[in-house]
Image (spheres, helix red, strand yellow):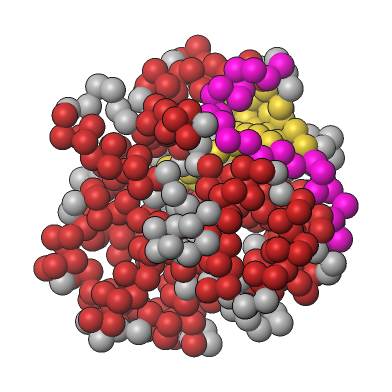
Amino acid sequence: MAAVAKRIIDDAVVRKDAKAGDRLLDRAFALAFKGLVYAQIWEDPVIDMEGLQIGPGMRVMCIASGSCNALSYLTADPAEVVAVDLNRARVALGKLKIAAIRNLPNYERFRRFFAEADHRENAAVYRESIAPHLDSQSRRYWESRDLTGRRRISHFTRGIYRQGLLGGFIGLAHLAARFYRVDLRKVLAANTLEEQRAIFETELAPVFDRAFVRWLTDHPASLFGLGIPPAQYKALAGDERMAVVLRRRLEKLACDFSVQDNYFAWQAFGRSYDRSPAAPLPPYLERRNWPLLRERISRIDIRNANMIDYLAHSDAASHDRYVLLDAQDWMDDAQLDVLWAQITRTARPGARVLFRTAAEPSLLPGRLSNDLLSRWTYRMGQSKQLTARDRSSIYGGVHLYEFAG
């Protein structure tokens, strides 16, 4: 099973037509990608649901990642959500969340386990209420030991959002900021957008002008912790230095949305969710949605699979909505054609596809075959609106396509 998982990731990440040096970088990223990457998904599910207009009876296919969004889609009342992921650690995380929703006694216990995720008693909660209901592979993952020798389930007693590739990257960013005498948490204490911008301009922005930061971020491996492979690094940078691009993306996160309504900002600047009663949280963690999740949790299916393979084994005209995250940034033109051929084959009338890109424009024109692209309508105006309002702020574009038939 481990060999199969390794092949799935290598096939998706390692570019066959790249130069030897680039393939070496791809393999290094593939190795890093095999562990837990994201404890929280970094795409805004509110934006997803607005663009997709998920409704009763619909079948949704998405990439699982941290499963935050896949679970949040259940609040829109679809008939089924199928979440696929190449990463076995993230599949185990999704199945842990499903078992918890099914078996924990109340919302308070669920929130303490997944929103706060650092209480000692979570170990006993896992052992008594969750573990007996997990599949064998997921249970083996959480009860095995990480590189530090600790059982992985102990992440939920020490702060799961400080773990994984992204958690470690954010931790290093905080450490680097302190070296320059910058406290990133100051953003979270701001009471207005004006205060947020003042803190960004006076304290955060100057860090990106430092020679060391510019030098470091010029290397693709420096962004592995963000889950950005070498192929996507080039798309993200474009014709600019990476430090300039990262400064602009961080500016949007720090300045364009109130921290009182943006849990992505809390994760970036505080390394956890806000613990106040009115804290911004992903929809699946909100109190008001707990009864809906309990009622609809049987409608979600999380699988360790490549989305192309999954769609290839699906019936024609069997899906209504597709969420591709930023996975296409990793693909060459041939892979895009294969993916969209399967999406087109399995799409029902009126189906919608939503994805994100590191760069601002949609990557499909000029790359996807005209025969396939002509069957889909790009909702340009709505895509621009969704991009502007995406609170995660790390992507250049959110793109929405509708099946024209």
Residue 81 point in image, percent of width and height: 72, 39
Q: Out of 348 and 305, give the one closest to the viewer.
A: 305
Quadrant housing residue 218: bottom left
Residue 230 horizontal side relative to residue 358, left or right: left
Res 90 visible: yes
Using the image, determine if residue 203 lies above or below residue 123. below
- Residue 299 drawn in magenta: yes
Residue 159 point in image, percent of width and height: 53, 72
Residue displayed at 88% across by 52% down: 295
The quadrant of the rendering that contains the C terminus is top right
Using the image, determine if residue 86 lies above or below residue 287. above
Residue at the far top: name it.
Answer: 371
Q: Main secondary structure of the magenta part?
A: helix
Residue displayed at 71% across by 16% down: 315
Quadrant housing residue 299: top right
Residue displayed at 18% across by 60% down: 216
Q: Out of 171 and 277, give the one closest to the viewer.
A: 171
Using the image, determine if residue 76 lies above or below residue 23. below
Highlighted range, magenta? 290-315
Q: How many marks?
A: 0
Residue displayed at 37% across by 71% down: 171
Q: Out of 59 and 161, give the one closest to the viewer.
A: 161
Res 261 visible: no
Q: Out of 115 and 405, give the one closest to the viewer.
A: 115
Using the image, determine if residue 153 lies above or below residue 54. below
Quadrant housing residue 181: bottom left
Residue 167 point in image, percent of width and height: 43, 64
Residue 161 point in image, percent of width and height: 51, 66
Residue 241 horizontal side relative to residue 256, left or right: left
